[in-house]
Amino acid sequence: MKEIALGRYVPYNSLIHRLDPRLKIVALIAFMVMIFFKFVSTAMNFLIYGILAIVIYIMMRIAKIKLITLFKSLKPMWLMICFLLIINILIPSTGDVLVEINGFKIYYNAIFNTLYIIIRLVLMLSLTMILTSTTKPLDLTYGLEWLMTPLKLIRFPVHEISMIISLALRFIPTLLEETDRIMKAQSSRGVDFEDGKLKDKIKAIISLIIPLFISSIQRSEELANAMEARGYDPSGKRTRYRKMKWCLRDTLSLGFIVIILGGLITLSITSFDVFALLGIEL
Amino acid sequence: MPINFSHVYYTYLPKSPFEYTALENINLGIKEGSFTAIIGHTGSGKSTLVQHINALLRPTSGEVTVGDFVISSSTKKIKGLVNLKKYAGLVFQFPEYQLFEETVLKDVAFGPKNFKENNKVAFDKAKKALLSVGIDENLFDKSPFELSGGQKRRVAIAGIIALEPKILVLDEPTAGLDPKGAKEMMNLFKQNNENGTTIIMITHDMNNVLTYCNQVVVMKKARVEKVCTPIELFKDDNILHNVGLEEPHIISFAKKLIKKGLNLNLNLIRDLNSLVDEIVKARKNK
């Protein structure tokens, strides 16, 4: 339980840590869109994925995220990847055949489609990890709130939503600590959380969940009372001690992202094929 | 010696930016049947230290021996780990959050049942434990969540006492209790101690340390600063000042009397009664 959860904020002081949270959120969305672009040929697709992967890897290096943490978080996904591969093989496809077993054809496309999904998953995971491990949860919600401000025009409760998100984020570590505490207390009473029969396991989970629920409900009630006692009013106008400041580095980063996004859109629309251009036959 | 720490280090989240060393080179022995207090400031490593006693935490390096059990960093799976939990019962700070069963009695019987006691024995043990902590029989079938804060604490502590541990570890058992309830609680532990249970208690209340304990472990910044008897500690103004402890009311009162010329023997003063006796004796000898 004490292990660092995936994407937990890590207080370094890198360039990416110092960037404006609003920019980081926009950049995340932009990169996510780029990951889903489709290009003229398979080779072109893989080339662009390769370039994106290099860019993302450089960003991870800047943010001081170790590759190993990414791979650790991928471990539980093996099952899903195998499942995807099987489904893709079973789905009828067209194109070149890789192997034929007793009249059952496995197409190159099935393999490629699975690979695309895996690459997209890994890239998306790394991007989210970069965002959450370089941005304090509170900054993240401030950024979200700012980005959602236009929605106020259609009477969307922007402030309330961002308050809910920031409270939820704020209490994740607290809940983890609480879980740890209760698990230790119950295992002192002989509960075995690791092995045991299914029946014992269910009992073990119950002895953890009930106290956890009760303390969470109590905590939320106390929090609500404390907020009310300090005169919290969701419709009130709020000022902030730490203001988000847009700096030159933010503008430069935004420019960089716009260039990549624009470039990829152009390549996609014009059906540009670098391999055909160079006359490389695949 | 039922409990022995030798060269124990413990580090939270090693090799990460959150790395934090909570125990540094702990060497400590606790005798069977003793009533030991562990004192020190918040963050000095007290709670981390006691969690090693029933192997909730394993030392990063070094070795902890508890009875016949040896806990070290290299042993992956400890043989009979479950039995260690029964041998050394640990009551956490504010233990009332661990209650979850429908009735008080069932909750206390939960522990013994986990150690494969049959229903009847488990309920008998639970009843005995509940009565010993002063919970009335008419509360047995109530939901633990209907009880008052003090009653919840008693029920939670009964949940560990029902395991009949040989070593009872308590993390600030009286925090947040009213003075009367706290005193009753301390007397309960004393009684358990007289019946042969080794008691290890984390506390901030120096009055309790003086009255009930026969050994004190002083912790400071992840290290054991001193191990001695309570009176040795409270006589030594240097260490009191060094660790930032406040002496018990009775001791500071006695020290003031000594300054004014009364000839008191600090070694014999443990509580109000013994203080009065000493004063009377000193007045007679004058």
Image (cartoon, rainbow, N blue to C red):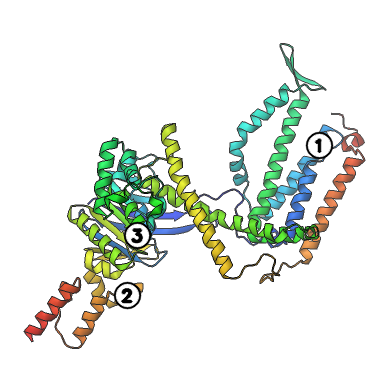
What mark, if any, has residue A45 been given in the picture? Answer: 1
Q: Quadrant of the C terminus of chain A?
A: top right
Q: Which residue is mark 3?
A: B150
Give x and y (percent) for residue A233.
Answer: 65, 67
Q: Secondary structure at mark 3?
A: helix
Residue at 48% across / 51% down in the picture? A214
Report the front residue among A237 and A11: A237
Q: CA distance from mark 2 to mark 1?
A: 71 Å
Label located before the other in sequence (3 or 2)? 3
What mark, if any, has residue B246 been given in the picture? Answer: 2
The answer to whether marks 2 and 1 sit on the same chain is no
The number of numbered discs placed on residues in the rendered structure image is 3
Q: Chain of mark 2?
A: B
Give x and y (percent) for residue A133.
Answer: 63, 54
The three-letter amino acid code for the residue at tag 1 is: Asn
Q: CA distance from mark 3 to mark 2?
A: 26 Å
